[in-house]
Image (cartoon, rainbow, N blue to C red):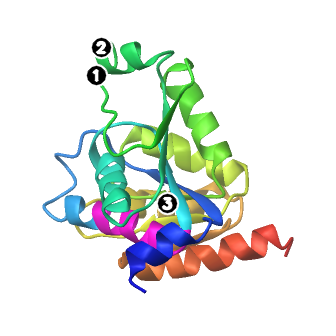
Amino acid sequence: MDNHTLSSSITPMYKICVSGAAETSHCGDQAFAQAQEVGREIIRHNAVLVDGATTGFPLWAARGAKEEGGIVIGFSPAVSEREHQKVYRLPTEYHDLIVYTGFDYSGRNLLLTRAADAVIVGCGRLGTLNEFTIAFEDNKPIGVLESEDWQTDDIIKTMIAKSHRGRGKIVYSQDPKELLDKLVILIAKEKAGK
């Protein structure tokens, strides 16, 4: 049985949010491939990908998830599909379902991270850091994708070190598969109450 058949025949266990920059010019040449592989690995790890129904890193992850035969759920800042496309100028492709929150970006970020069992942070900007801090405050499992092409992982490590709030439930890796392996263990522990 191949991965596509396997992933579509098993009920997904977890909802994993992908957080990252909608505008990715600062993310380096490998960001597209890394994001797609994150999306594929989420599906290979028997999970649903959840994202902000936006462009850039999350959209590329959604594309990878769909190529792997998985389910993708987006949370839009808009109140309707029309506003999503016309006002926010956001895509709908690579998504099975989009929830139109009507809460602009900051409200969307809160609902998005709270709807997920865990959050993966890729190359990002301020909105990504907002989603990270919400997940951290909620004590959710977090996976940080490291890369020499962007600084998001380094910024998060500095924030954690200087915040004096403990290490949180955070795992790091440059390899999407290894990152998901580690993150799924954290989610399983969380669900088991450990």
Residue interval drawn in magenta: 35-46
Q: Residue at x 83, y 73 (%)?
A: 192
Front tag of 1 and 3: 1
Disc 1 element:
loop
x, y percent for residue 188 = 72, 75
Q: SS of the residue at dot 2? A: helix
Label 1, label 3: how far apart the Cα atoms are? 24 Å
Residue occupying the far bottom of the picture = 1
Name the residue tied to disc 3: 120
Binning the other alpha carbons within 10 Å of mark 1 as few (below 14), some (14 to 19) or many (20 upward) gives: few
Q: Which mark is residue 78?
A: none
Q: Is residue 90 left or right of residue 95?
A: left
> What residue did someone put label 1 on?
89
Whether pointer 2 and pointer 1 mark residues with C-beta atoms closer than 8 Å, the reply is yes
The Cα atoms of the two marked residues, 2 and 1, are separated by 5 Å
Query: Is residue 173 visible to us here?
Result: no
Is 7 included in the stretch rendered in magenta?
no
